[in-house]
Image (spheres, coloured by chain):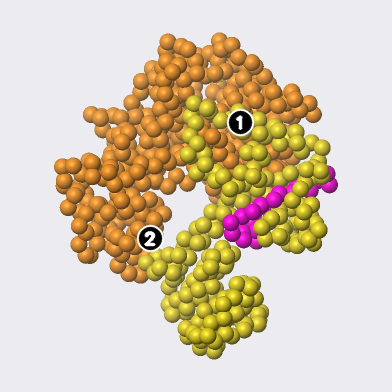
Amino acid sequence: MTILLYDGTFEGLLTAIFEVYEYKFDPAEIIAEERYNTESIFSATHKVSTDQEKSDRVLKRLEKNIGKKGISQLLKVYLSENENAERLILSAVSQSILFPNEYILENFANSDIMEIAKITKSVSREVHRMHAFVRFEKLQDEVYFAKIEPDFNVLPLIIRHFKNRYQDQKWMIYDLRRHYGIFYDLNEAQFFEPALEQTSQLKRTENILHEEEIQYQKLWQRYFFKTNIPERKNMNLHVQSLPKRYWKYLTEKL
Amino acid sequence: MNFPRLQEKLEILADAAKYDVSCSSSGGNRKNKKGGLGDSHATGICHSYTEDGRCVSLLKILLTNHCIYDCAYCVSRKSNDIKRAAFTVEEVVDLTINFYRRNYIEGLFLSSGIFKDAETTMERLVRVAKKLRKEHNFNGYIHLKSIPGASDEIMKEAGLYADRLSINLEIPTTRGLKLLAPEKSHDQMIKPMGFIKNELNLYKEEKKIFKNVPKFAPAGQSTQMIVGATDETDLKIIKVADHFYQNFKLKRVYYSGYVPMLEDKRLPSIDSQVPMLRENRLYQADWLMRFYGFKADEILEKSNPFLDLEVDPKLAWALRNREQFPVNINTATKEMILRVPGIGRKSMYKILTARNFQKLNLEHLRKMGVATNRAKYFVEFESQNIFNKYIDDFNFRKIILQGMKSKFQNPFSEQLTLF
Ligand code: SF4
């Protein structure tokens, strides 16, 4: 068994996959360096240095076999941060090389593919939830700011949606768990990583809110309360649709 | 902005609008023109859920709850002694924009009591939509209630700015409507529906020839029927729904279990229950007609015109038509697979693609997300399926019911994954 250690990036992972074939490592396991802690005496390690060209070659091949749609599925598996992500992606790539003329991601009777389908479904659901549950607060400098804590690393997957939607206002979405965000400045949406001393400020925004902000929040809360029909109360359905872990960032549930 | 006053109006006019159960923001296809605000999602987005489990997608309010009519089932009726309020056009626009910018909503659902006459009321609703589109470059979703009796000209204008238009039938039978809303008639409601249908067709035709035809209500029209305010049967209700789907190209029919809130001897007593399960079954029946290829009279028969409250209508159909089962998963048609209890549309597609790769068995179905606790009795494979023998069992219904926990599905969700 050969263990390939890579830097944790998607390109790094694709490079590692390339090298599995290049050096004919079989069996092989791919692990992100920062997650690798137990040295095993039964397996050799191979350190991968991320190589754009190798990664592009894997992508090209994938695009031919499973198309952009397939690649975006695998990207979702990667962003899921699932502990089996590398193994599943490697498995899918090998299958697509074995059966280049089939859309192997639909072979649902294969357990790896079914697991990929499950993971991508959860990630897509989280993306959808972020589209729904992001709540912006208007700050004094007219930036609309939102904090999120998604289960998966979906920030890269939601940029386009918010960019299409909010073109005439500056906005910022910040992932509290992964300590990075996106900022749209009326021209472009870009990733940013705040310096350590800034992160605490991003967590506490109540002193920098726009003067009208609290009023609109209150209006929204009252609307939310009044649009409910108490005679139809159904808390099971409520909690099922609006899982509790999202509540702390939902203006109407504060 | 006078926030306390605005808040008071919002509370009154949201409260008065909440009985309209339509919440959908789907079917919109407005793209954000360069630099504007908003972009409509084809599938719609529920931004929140109230404690009654309903999706909150649009800011749903009345422009005013002043009304010259006296419909028995409506809180805003003239004879009801309640607080009245009216928004200005600017206030509605401001709320919509500010809620939208904070990602609270997909857009606006604006309805109104009839405060002077139909035309004036409709004209005011259209003014809000026009202002949002023209002055604020707003591309979010707008659903306008059409006021029966408004002119074709104003309806036409409404369609230019709104994504969806709706007219609520409210009471499915002519007799019931006469009893509860003597000032209204179905004819009066059907007329604008017909007009909208024609405009939608016209738009489609013109679109083929000219590239830049202005959009007309791209998300189509919908309606709502109140369930349980009069004594109509479920068969009658789904027949009416079917009729409107077929003849008026409706996108959706909503069913709203009557919430008793008014003392009136024509209505169910104030302490009767909201018929939520019945309403849920009606949605399931509705889905069977729209997406599962069922006909109204396959779902219910004259001799038994009410939906089974114990089992969903698809399972009920299967129980009545056992001779059609078991269905062979590896060879059956798409239509027949869809009729298997426990198999929804998504699993159906998975089955169709996966069986190109290999023969499937029950374990595969389970992994694909099929509700095998029901489906197992109704499907067969190449190898023997021991559950098939129960189909002819006298107690089959009971056996199935024991094996499943009935789960209350959210009828208002955009993706009602049934059965
Ligand atoms: S016309 Fe509309 S608002 Fe007026 S009482 Fe009838 S249902 Fe209510």
- Colour given to chain A in the rendered image: yellow
Q: Amino acid at mark 1?
A: Phe
B8 vs A204: above or below: above
Q: Amino acid at mark 2?
A: Lys
Relative horizontal placement of residue B404, taking residue B18 as reference (left or right): left
A113 vs B118: above or below: below
| Chain colored orange | B
Judged from the image, the secondary structure of the residue bearing numbered disc 2 is helix
Which residue is outermost to the bottom? A23
Q: Image quadrant of residue B219?
A: top right
Residue A82: x and y in percent read: 54, 65
Give the magenta part as a residue range. Answer: A140-162
Relative horizontal placement of residue B102, taking residue A41 as reference (left or right): right
Judged from the image, the secondary structure of the residue bearing numbered disc 1 is helix
Chain of residue at mark 2: B
Name the residue carrying label 1.
Answer: A225
